[in-house]
Image: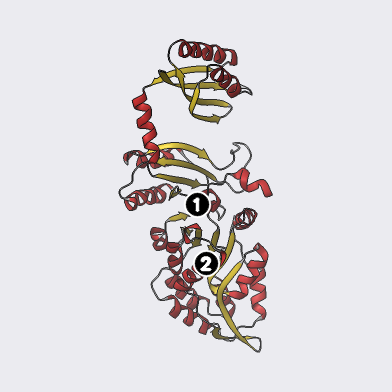
Amino acid sequence: MATEIFLLNISGQDKPGLTSGLTNVLAHYDAKVLDIGQANIHDTLSLGFLFEIESGVKSAAVLKDLLFKAYELGVKAKFTPISSEDYEKWVSNQGKDRYIVTILGEKLTAEQISKVTRVISEKNLNIDAIKRLTGRLSLVKKDEYPRASIQLSIRGKIDNKAEFTEKFLQISHDLDVDIAFQEDNIYRRNRRLVCFDMDSTLIQAEVIDKLAELAGVGDEVKAITESAMNGEIDFKESFKQRMALLKGLSEEVLQDVAVNLPITKGAKRLIDALKKYGFKTAILSGGFTYFGHYLQKELGIDYVYANELEIKEGLLTGNYVGEIVDGDKKAEYLKEIAQKEGIDIAQTIAVGDGANDLPMLNLAGLGIAFHAKPTVKNNAQSAISSIGLDGILYLLGYHDRHIDLFE
């Protein structure tokens, strides 16, 4: 039996019953639907059917009836015949590598999207789908926390991924937008563990700097912290130097600092959503357990690994208890938690801002440099610099309606 293949494109005002009416016509003539897709912007519909139909009387009749049904529904119909050779070529492309490009910012401009899609086009990659992940923005009502995100699903062969991401980094720098590039594999859709650095990531402060200010050695400690975060000096050595400067600080100061920690924008929204969707969370910090446990209680974090202050007779001794949690130790803890929870390392996410976070960022299935130092941002898989921590949810493919479901 000879058959023909047609692509039916429907456009016009969306209304209930469109898909039902058109598929009813196709069903009447025993058409086989090979593909179907729909997009809806501002109540304007774009609907496509790729179908196979018996040649001759049936194919002629189905086209006529579909045109009549489209007229009846008040939409436009366009038919395109597809050769069996073109169809098979199209089918063969479905085995190509797939990737996700997520664009994030307070607002997105045509220039930003144009630059990103030009890079994709220059690499001969196809965009299969474009999906908005954030809610619609009002032009009248001011949003206290503006954010916008779209997700591009792309397909094709990438010979040099480093060059590809380098171009995105340049666009990100030039146009103040975040661009995340990930392989679209089973692990991307099944992340199970998120590990956070604490200082300047979960909180908008370096606790040790705050303690140093109260101890009257703020400038000295801040200079050492900055040098360590930029990777200019060894973290362990910097930690010992800073700890020694805190000697004699009263334990009472710790509680005052803890209750006034400035939690990062979007952190609570992110962790609430992660918990509802069954993720495990952890703080892996070169800071202190005292503050990590405070945040654990406030946000509902599952694990905390950080440095323990030595306190005697109510005063900091300038020493620490146990091993120093440096970059390598953070990566070790990430691996340990994943093994304990039965989670593949490819299903993990690590988030941090400093050079001592790079080992865990590079080990995790997805490493995210959050409002990070340039050295860190340039060496991480992905970066978020334009919005809050809940931007991570968009990298996971969640839409606002999935996130705000629990609020």
**Given the image, on which type of amino acid does mark 2 rest?**
Gln
Residue depicted at x 66% and y 46%: 405
User: Can residue 138 be seen from the camera position used here?
Assistant: yes
Q: How crowded is mark 1: few (under 14 residues within 10 Å), some or many (20 or more)?
A: some
Above or below for 366 versus 233: above
Spot occupied by residue 100 in the image (x, y as percentages of width and height): 45, 45
User: Can residue 199 be seen from the camera position used here?
Assistant: no
Residue 251: quarter of image: bottom right
- Give me the disc on residue 386: 1
Q: Is mark 1 on a helix, strand or loop?
A: loop
Disc 2: which residue: 339
Residue depicted at x 61% and y 64%: 262
Pointers 2 and 1 in contact (C-beta within 8 Å): no
Relative to 95, 291 lies left or right? right
Spot occupied by residue 231 in the image (x, y as percentages of width and height): 40, 70
Front residue of 340 and 157: 340
Q: Is mark 2 on a helix, strand or loop?
A: helix
* Quarter of the picture holding the N terminus: top left
Front residue of 216 and 336: 336
Above or below for 180 versus 361: above
Front residue of 286 and 131: 131
